[in-house]
Image (spheres, helix red, strand yellow):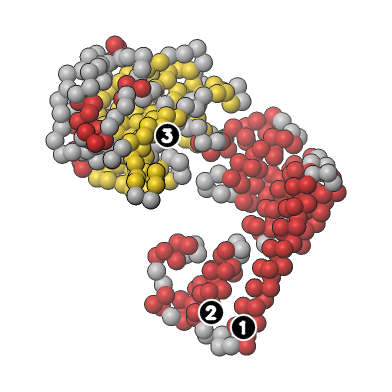
Amino acid sequence: MNHHTVRLRHCGYWLALSLLFTACTQPHPKAASKKVVNAAPASSALKSTIVKGDTALICVADTEAGVFDPEKGNFDDFVAHKKGYFKGKKELSDNYVRKHLFSGLDSVPIENPYMGQIVDERPVDEYIANTDFYLITTALKTPRFKGIIYEEIGDEGSRKFFSTIDRNGKFISRLIIAAYEYAGTYTEDADTRHGYYSGMDGCISKDLVIDMGGGEDDIYKVHPDGKIVKYMREYYDSVLLVHPNDADLHLRYARYLRDRYEKDYPGAKRQFENVLKIDPTVAVATNEYAYLLWLHFNDTTEANLYFKKAIELAPKVRQFRSDYKFFLNRHVRDEKTRKGYEKALKLADSNNFGMHLDYARFLLKIDWKQEARRHYLKAVALNKNLKNKKDDDLFGIE
């Protein structure tokens, strides 16, 4: 199989906080046998691994991996024979890893940072047995904790982490800061598929703010206690205390709450309302508020008014007219379908569990979540064989 290497670089400034940070997909287990590699002291780390800059506390890169050909073996075999790869890296013993990197944990959560979700977890002992760990450097020390950069190497690539450890040597938090690993396959033609590897690197700012490169929902902050937490809610709330009448700031906050991985539509609604209370002439906020009311609150009456108001405020903006036309066409179609289900359930047997389930799926599609849940529960009550975890999760049943 051929391979293709993709390198991603994210660099920039955000609200006067200079930072850079990137992420990758979940780790892959390595071969059962571990290799012992003589490593140079951490202080002699290559610039290709550690790069210090004026605007960042520390930067981590993946460039020492070079170009890996998966046809010639596993990644861990590749780096074991690559001259200079382990220079400046100190191999960590299983005891050190268990005591300091995963202390207090029975299992290691595996996160997909692109989605901001935990997708798997593995027992600590199994995870350690299938991974090689190397200390790259101690990035910072505070009175309460220290932050280290270390690397995990497995069959299909490398991940580098920033991890915080308290004064007693106990694990606090960790976050991926660079990676070079298998990312999937792509199709060249009907008969040919190639694997590709993705390279990512990043930096931690002097303010201990970390940006994973995926927008505001991927910005983190290292707190004084060493915990690494998502940052933007904290940021917006603190700045709005100082500038409560900044309509643009409220609008950005509204979009963040609406678009983040863990959606907060009620919070977004409040922020859009704050924007329009401060300045009712902001056409773009008016149009986006109309969409929010329609798609996530099923308030088609108010949505219709705000779509029309956006056009009145900015009659030359074609997008607003296009959005309103889309709303009208979709709303008419959805209402016709919804009323058809309601009529059918009245005329036919109201105990038709199949129709209740179909109606529930339709309602969920148009974001009528409460009604969708009600009809799903009705269908399950009529036929207990319909109940399954996938649909329970889909309809928000705990």
What residue does disc 3 label?
Answer: 23
Q: State left or right for residue 298 relative to residue 198.
A: right
Q: Are marks 1 and 2 in contact (CB under 8 Å)?
A: yes
Between 143 and 374, the one lying in front of the other is 374
User: Residue at point 75% right, 57% down?
Assistant: 325
Say few, some or many: other residues with alpha carbon within 10 Å of mark 2 (under 14 / 14 to 19 / 20 or more): some
Q: Residue at x 45, y 30 (%)?
A: 8
Would you say the residues marked 3 and 2 are in contact, meaning their CB atoms lie under 8 Å apart?
no
Residue 274 position by quadrant:
top right
Question: Closer to the N terminus: mark 3 or mark 2?
Answer: 3
Placement of the N terminus among the 4 image quadrants = top left
* Image-based side of 286 in relation to 388, left or right: right
The one of 69 and 212 positioned closer to us in this rendering: 69
In three-dimensional space, the C-alpha distance between marks 1 and 3, rounded to whole angstroms, equals: 50 Å
Q: Secondary structure at mark 3?
A: loop
Q: Image height check: is 35 above or below 30?
A: above
Type of amino acid under label 2: Met
x 74%, y 47%: residue: 319
Q: Which residue is found at the position 31% from the left and 47% from the top?
A: 121
Q: Amino acid at mark 3?
A: Ala
Disc number for residue 344: 1
Q: N-terminal of the two: label 1 or label 3?
A: 3
Q: Residue 97 at x, y = what percent?
A: 24, 31
Helix, strand or loop status at disc 1: helix
- Image position of 345 with respect to 87: above or below: below
Q: Residues within 10 Å of mark 3 (few under 14, many from 20)?
A: many
Q: Position of residue 124 (x, y in %)?
A: 24, 41
Left or right: 103, with 116 as reference point? left
The amino acid pointed to by label 1 is Ala
Q: Which residue is mark 2?
A: 355
